[in-house]
Image (cartoon, rainbow, N blue to C red):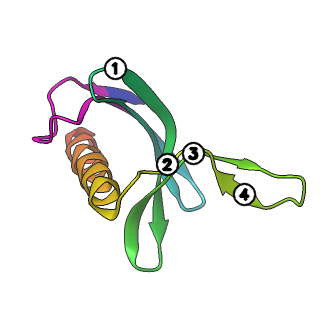
Amino acid sequence: MTQEVQESSGNSLFSDFRLSLVNKDNLRAIASCKVGGAVYLSGMRVVSGSKGLFVAMPSRKDKKGEYRDIFFPASRAVRDGLQQAILSKYAQVVSAVPH
């Protein structure tokens, strides 16, 4: 299921969220959003971890077989804002799905 959310997150840096719900292992959703009104960032994953939900950045496997982020926020504040916005949209989408 893909759910597009057009309103901003309250943080003008991130907008136009799109979420595709997934229920495979600990993966819960794939997310994308517009950053700064200019660039779309896709491939972020909402993951259920031992301490709750978190957002994993897009990554690729390197030559050694290890995964490396191909995008990462420039500061902790930006990372926290992005994660909070995506998890908020995820909660909205999940609560709207009939059980």
Residue position for label 1: 38
Q: Tag 4 or tag 3, which sits nearer the N-term? A: 3
Front position in the image: 87 or 60: 60
Q: Specify few, some or many for label 2: CA neighbours under 10 Å numbering under 14, 14-19, or 20 or more.
A: many
> Tags 4 and 2 in contact by the CB under 8 Å rule?
no
Of all residues, the one furthest to the top in this rendering is 38
Q: Secondary structure at mark 2?
A: strand
Q: Position of residue 46 (x, y in %)?
A: 44, 53
Q: CA distance from mark 3 to mark 4?
A: 10 Å
Q: Position of residue 73 (x, y in %)?
A: 42, 51
Q: Tag 2 or tag 4, which sits nearer the N-term? A: 2
Residue position for label 4: 67
Q: Specify few, some or many for label 3: CA neighbours under 10 Å numbering under 14, 14-19, or 20 or more.
A: some
User: What's the residue at 14%, 41% (across, down)?
Assistant: 11
User: What's the residue at 79%, 61% (across, down)?
Assistant: 66
Q: Tag 3 or tag 2, which sits nearer the N-term? A: 2
Give above or below for 29 relative to 19: below
Residue position for label 2: 45
Mark drawn on residue 17: none
Residue 11 counted in the magenta span: yes
Q: Depth-wise, is mark 2 or mark 1 nearer the camera?
A: 1
Q: Position of residue 52 (x, y in %)?
A: 37, 72
Q: Is residue 20 visible?
A: no
Look at label 1 and name its amino acid.
Answer: Ala
Look at label 2 and name its amino acid.
Answer: Arg
Look at label 3 and name its amino acid.
Answer: Pro
Of all residues, the one furthest to the left in this rendering is 10
- The stretch of residues the image draws in magenta is 4-18
Residue position for label 3: 58
Q: CA distance from mark 4 to mark 1?
A: 27 Å
